[in-house]
Image: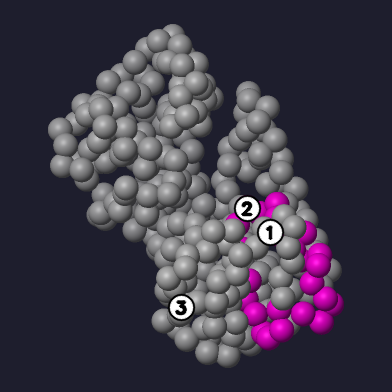
């Protein structure tokens, strides 16, 4: 990679951590198409993929071996990254680190739930650690904070709504469900990784990445009904009843991730500006209404 935005993927190794994630699902074939040598890291690698060098690693324990010019795409939990980087030799030919945090680092820092505040604090500290390490070693870094990710049925938001609708034929919301959302497709985030590789403007910058459409929580749910060719049946439930239901959810494994605070956010705006990403590397995400949703 050079400072004039030229990059020859055929001469590079790409290491992708968290490779079986939603973003990895779309990023790996893109890297192969560009002729990049790919090493994919996962605790549960597939056994049928012979085009990619899969490695079974626990990133909280294991280090990485980097012997050739490499771009590291860290899609695994961000707190695992600094421990990995700290184990690398000084002469490691690491050309660029592209890592994923989350907008939860911004939206949950003042949450009423200690667990959510702790997640936000861990992300914030991991971001600081990444910047400090890379700048001390002269390694360019790019940090992405995506919003509500969907795309191949691995998320606990859009997919949860779709599965609930499929099973019960309706979906409950708190009040009017007026909070604004910007769902982002995992394929657009994978494409953003490649765009960031090609633009030195992304070096040592952090970006909030969201989808190309802002819509209310209610409208988002309504569109998921349409995607499944089902009649819209959205039931507005008063807060006291929904609060009782959230306590019941905590005892049900398939919905235990739902908390009182998460439910309350149905009426809160969780929107971000991605104009800096559009300016620096041409980020142009799809809108939620124009695509099919691959769910299971």
Instruction: Confirm whether the magenta stretch covers residue 72.
Output: yes
Whether residue 106 can be seen here: yes
Quickly name the residue at label 1. Answer: 59
- Number of residues whose C-alpha sits closer than 10 Å to that of mark 1, classed few (under 14), some (14–19) or many (20 or more): many
Whether residue 211 can be seen here: no
Instruction: Confirm whether the magenta stretch covers residue 51.
Output: no
Q: Which percent across, then down, holds residue 134?
A: 76, 67
**Residue contact at pointers 3 and 2, CB within 8 angstroms:** no
Q: Which percent across, then down, holds residue 171?
A: 29, 27
Judge from the rendering whether residue 156 lies leftward or rightward of residue 198; answer left or right. left
Tell me which corner region of the image, top left, top right, bottom left or bottom right, holds residue 75: bottom right
Q: Which circle, 3 or 2, is nearer the viewer?
A: 3
Quickly name the residue at label 3. Answer: 50
Q: Which circle, 1 or 2, is nearer the viewer?
A: 1
For the point 50% across and 77% down, the residue is: 52
How many numbered discs? 3
Query: Of label 1 and label 2, which has the lower sequence position?
Result: 1
Q: Which percent across, then down, holds residue 197?
A: 56, 76
Viewer-proximal residue among 61 and 31: 61
Tell me which corner region of the image, top left, top right, bottom left or bottom right, holds residue 7: bottom right
Q: Identify the magenta region.
A: 66-92
| Residue 235 versus residue 50 in the image, above or below | above
Of the 4 image quadrants, the one containing the N terminus is bottom right
Quickly name the residue at label 2. Answer: 77
């Amino acid at each position: 990679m050079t400072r004039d935005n030229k990059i020859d993927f055929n001469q590079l190794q790409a290491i992708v951590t968290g490779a079986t994630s939603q973003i990895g699902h779309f990023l790996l074939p893109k890297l192969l198409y560009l002729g990049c040598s790919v090493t994919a890291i996962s605790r549960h690698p597939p056994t049928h993929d012979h085009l990619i060098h899969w490695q079974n690693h626990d990133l909280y324990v294991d280090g990485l071996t980097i012997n050739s010019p490499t771009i590291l795409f860290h899609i695994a939990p961000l707190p695992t990254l600094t421990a990995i980087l700290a184990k690398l030799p000084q002469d490691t030919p690491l050309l660029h680190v592209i890592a994923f945090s989350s907008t939860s680092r911004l939206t949950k820092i003042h949450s009423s739930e200690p667990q959510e505040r702790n997640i936000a604090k861990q992300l914030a500290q991991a971001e600081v650690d990444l910047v400090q390490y890379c700048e001390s070693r002269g390694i360019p870094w790019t940090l992405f904070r995506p919003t509500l990710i969907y795309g191949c049925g691995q998320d606990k938001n859009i997919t949860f709504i779709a599965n609930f609708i499929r099973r019960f034929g309706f979906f409950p919301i708190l009040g009017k469900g007026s909070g604004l959302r910007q769902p982002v497709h995992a394929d657009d985030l994978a494409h953003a990784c490649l765009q960031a590789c090609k633009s030195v403007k992304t070096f040592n910058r952090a970006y909030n990445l969201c989808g190309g459409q802002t819509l209310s929580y209610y409208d988002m749910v309504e569109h998921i009904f349409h995607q499944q060719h089902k009649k819209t049946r959205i039931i507005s439930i008063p807060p006291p009843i929904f609060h009782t239901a959230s306590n019941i959810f905590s005892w049900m494994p398939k919905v235990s991730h739902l908390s009182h605070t998460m439910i309350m956010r149905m009426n809160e705006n969780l929107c971000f500006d991605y104009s800096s990403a559009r300016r620096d590397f041409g980020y142009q995400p799809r809108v939620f209404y124009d695509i099919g949703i691959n769910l299971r």
